[in-house]
Image: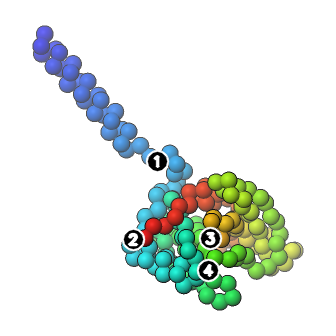
Amino acid sequence: MIRYFLVFLLSCVIFITGCTQGNQNATNPSIPEGYEALVLTDQQKTEIWEAAEKTGVEKVYIPSFVRKGQKLMKVVVSTGDVFYFRLVFSGEGEGYYLQITESPEEVLLDGVIIEEKETKIKDIPAKWISFSNSRDNVEAASAGLYFKMESTFIRIAESEFKKPFKITQSVEEMAASLQPLTK
């Protein structure tokens, strides 16, 4: 009888252990399918903070996730007429890339506004703005999501390789996942 009880007890322990391990391996429900948590090295964080300092951005924001395989490829700094820095994410052999532009002042693309569409990101007013080199060239229009978080103006845009930036749900999801970068 004791042997049956021990076998039963051991079976229960194995069953409970299996259930627990399954929960530990569950994916993060806040990260959409096809995306993964963004990981930055200390060197990349330093490079971003140096870019922010050069451009006057006091609070830097990064997405919690990016497309699977994407990494921060470069940080572009502009200190011309408008001060901003741009984070460019891409993956090897991947057809998508992501740009996040941050500035202490509003940064709009050059060209003619083709379309504006209002939305909200975490209860913050935002706009999708599509630009083109002329009103007649709608096919070449490039879209970006524009909004302001505290003192930082942000533009997020995602594109397939060699195609204009388009309005996508994934950009709004990434925008909603933005969090302050800590030193």
User: For the residues carrying marks 3 and 1, which lies nearer the camera in this image?
Assistant: 3
Q: Residues within 10 Å of mark 3 (few under 14, many from 20)?
A: many
Q: Nearer the viewer, mark 4 or mark 3?
A: 3
Q: Secondary structure at mark 4?
A: strand
Q: What residue would you read off at disc 1?
A: 28
Q: Which mark is residue 84?
A: 4
| Callout 1 amino acid | Asn
Residue corresponding to mark 3:
152
Give x and y (percent) for residue 105. Answer: 68, 77
Task: Tell me if residue 98 can be seen.
Answer: yes
Q: Is residue 161 visible?
A: no
Label 2 element class: loop
Q: Is residue 115 left or right of residue 100?
A: right
* Residue 10 on image: x %, y %: 20, 25
Provide the residue designation for mark 2.
41
Q: What is the C-alpha distance between the residues marked 1 and 2?
A: 21 Å
Amino acid, disc 4: Tyr
Disc 3/disc 1 C-alpha distance (Å): 28 Å
- Is the Cβ of the residue at disc 4 closer than 8 Å to that at disc 1? no
Residue type pointed to by label 2: Thr
Q: For the residue marked with disc 3, what is the amino acid?
A: Thr
